[in-house]
Amino acid sequence: MYDVVIIGAGITGTMLARDLSMYHLRIAVIEKENDIADGATMANSAIVHTGYDPEPGTLKAKLNVAGARRYEKICSDLSCHYKTVGAYIAACGKEEEAHLDILAQRAEEREIPYRFLSREEALAQEPSLSANVTKVLDFYTTAVIYPWEVAIACMENAVNNGADLFLNCPCMGIEKLEGSYIIHTPEKDLITKTVVNAAGTFADQIARMVNDDPGFVIRPRRGEYYILDQDVKPVNHIIFPVPTAAKGKGVLAVPTVYGNTLIGPSSDYIDEPDDTGTSAQGLAYVRTNISKTLKNIPLNRSIRTFAGIRPASDHADFIIEEDAKNPGFINAASIESPGLASAPGISQYIINEFISKYFVLKEDPEAVHTRKADPVLNELSTEEKNALIAKNPAYGRIICRCEQISEGEIIDCIRRVCGARSVKGVKKRVRPGMGRCQGGFCEPLVLNILARELGISPLDVVLDSPESHILESENRK
Amino acid sequence: MRHYQAVIIGGGSAGLSAAVTLKQNGIEDIVVLEKDMEPGGILEQCIHNGFGLQTFKEQLSGPAYAQRYVKMAQDLNVEIKLNTMVTKLNADRTVEYTSSAEGIQTISADAVILAVGCYERSRGAINIAGTRCAGVYTAGQAQRYLNIEGYMVGKKVFILGSGDIGLIMARRMTLEGAKVYGVAEIMPYSNGLPRNIRQCLEDFDIPLYLSHTVTKTFGKDRLEKIELMEVDEHMNPIAGTEQYFDVDTLLLSVGLIPENHLAEEAGIQMDPSIKGPYVDDSYMTSAPGIFACGNGLHVHDLVDFVSLQAKRAAEGAARYLKNPKDRGETLAVKPGENVLYTVPSCVHPSDAEENVEFFFRVRKPMDEGTLEVTSGDRVIRTMKKKKLMPSEMERVIITAKEIATLDGEVRISVKEANA
């Protein structure tokens, strides 16, 4: 019997699993996909917003501020990237400048550092600002992360502390017993005292398994993005337009951890909770709207487009509450922006408000808080690289020429706890295929390494899901 | 730090030709750095024939063509470091490489020749809407899986883009039992060589959809369907022209891009019209002593011209190594009317010792046109040309004597007949 079963291995679920794994609790995370962080966590703007934007009095405001404050330490403990780049909110004209004052006021109340920049001051730092921009509010402590890296690291930390992770394990139904729940999955039933529903765009479907009217409906909203080549760096800071009630945070430019620039997102309600296809209209929207705040963005240097789904709902705020009819069944739903930044706050909130009602939370003295990352060749000095290659020649065999990723690093990420099981899993962990050739050269090599390390036929290596085969058949053997 | 007379980055068709030429010109202390486990580059997976008609006057397969150069290089004792990835190039001609055998090493050279090849434009660069499921490959990737690894990527195939690798793969996969439903080309004309259209599509009754593009992919895990639409003269899809094909595989043959991260990092000036470095008539880039050639300079349609150009670049490097003098003022050579680009992009009239062959491509197909080379207001050369195609590289030689007389910016243009 588990104490807590978390449904969904996105940033919300994995962050909670890690925090819970510090206590004497039996925890399981079930995930319907073939990897951790395959939904909204995989495709978003990758920003740790400081928390100036949400309306006062909301959970979003409270948990964003709390979450953002924990991030740097979490990333440091888990050896994840955390890069403070700063965020410029670029106002165009008097009306928008007035809105900057509101945001500054909120920042003041929430003790978030900020400063105003004149057009000239901002332009000196960001030459690509458009002629429309009249004034900038600079949240200079804003950071970018690699969202799935953090989720994978949290899950690994939790598993090392005894948590169970079940991938390809959709929740098919939930049965309520006296003081416990049975979670039905295709291969096994899990019995648990409490359940946390962190199922993202499927959270309402899960909630309805225990309550016909859980009080919310997920309204998935798609956001489409361009990713630009590392060789072009149009911005040094995150550039936001002034947020509006209707359009949210608008179309941004984000300098990512690895030096690619993200341009997006669009914002369109969609019917299917997993429809991550891109659309001609969505990308056109991004192209048109980025020009409000920025000029000469080299979209012709795009190396990829993608779409992510915000697990938004018919509520404006996060929904983090115990189901009205089912004690111990906790919904963490409607976690749209700033969900990523809020995740550490959400996790603590769930523990303090709900989990603590059911368990006497005793810290496990044996629990580990840190995680050591495998060597990343690109981040080492020449001497360190040479020492590594001397010990293991696989680090000297460069597989991905765009990102300069070695075979050694790929092997490491497959052999690790919560390791890669797919080409996309390798890409998420150590980046081959993230560069300008998009895996044109390295995918066949990565595929062979996966087959060898997993002890399977190349025919059984998948791109992502268990059915996403890359090779169809052996040719005339 | 080990010092060489010349370091050649890349051991494919350009790099091997450059190495052989350097040796033939008495430059002995050279090394070729090659990332793969064997020399030959992308030719190793090009098992079809059609290579070598210009160079060897016979039809060879890719590996056989490469082997000729490997043999020449071996006979001349060219040192080739295999499994060796160049990880940094500096403008001062120091080169950092990484290999299992040697770790990270930095070497220096009096001359560096970039022979780095090109990569295929990916799906991300062309923005097809729809899911990002398995089953979408670049044509070269599918070629590698089939010809090197021995696997078919799918059995029901559609191909976007009429580049030569796509056409070759249409034939190859058909011969291996796949059904190829069609090739779509967004332009109103093919981007492949006419001989490949004939031998790879027409001979196998594979339809070529000109002025069409793939607008959407469908399928959650693996590709299930594609949407094909006709486009207008601005390349925008025309509503109401949607057609659907139930395929498990989409190959992309939508362009090749010179691989120039190393050159850009070294601060070498790039020519946006070729996506490679600006080079002068000796194939020297803006960085003194660094030369560029082959598909890493601009994308060629025939490997024979890659070898030829690499030979010229190596000859330029050899002259430079023997006499690294200031060659005086440069005069720009620019594409004029109906011309997309010209290589080289400048000459030295005050130091014109050699004839210079210019490579250029036209912007659009023309049945008949007049090639014109001008310097300022002066016409240097005119020549009638027939059947000009963007897919086929054109060449024109300007003699050393002519170059010495040039006094104004040089333009190469093609005036369309009856236009």
Image (tube, rainbow, N blue to C red):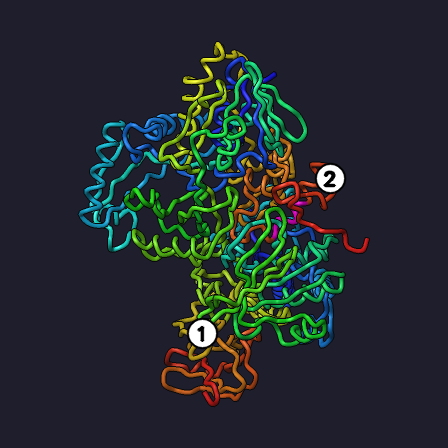
Q: Are marks 2 and 1 in contact (CB under 8 Å)?
A: no
Q: Which mark is residue B347?
A: 1
Q: Which residues are drawn in magenta?
A: A441-447
Please state which of residues B173 and A118 is positioned toward the viewer in this rendering: B173
Q: Does the magenta segment cover residue B211? A: no
Question: Chain ID for label 1?
Answer: B
The amino acid type found where label 2 is placed reads Ile
State the residue lying farthest toward the right.
Answer: A477
Label 1 Cα crowd, 10 Å radius (few <14 / some 14-19 / many 20+): many
Q: Residue sitting at 54 percent across and 56 percent down?
A: B123
The spot of residue A343 in percent (x, y) is: 43, 29
The residue pinned by badge 2 equals A456
Q: Is residue B314 above or below residue A31?
A: below
The spot of residue A330 in percent (x, y) is: 47, 23
The amino acid type found where label 1 is placed reads Val
Give the number of marks. Answer: 2
The spot of residue B53 in percent (x, y) is: 69, 75
Please state which of residues B20 and B386 is positioned toward the viewer in this rendering: B386
Q: Is residue B170 left or right of residue B108?
A: right
Q: Main secondary structure of the magenta part?
A: helix
Mark whose residue sits in front, 2 or 1: 2
Q: Are marks 2 and 1 on the same chain?
A: no
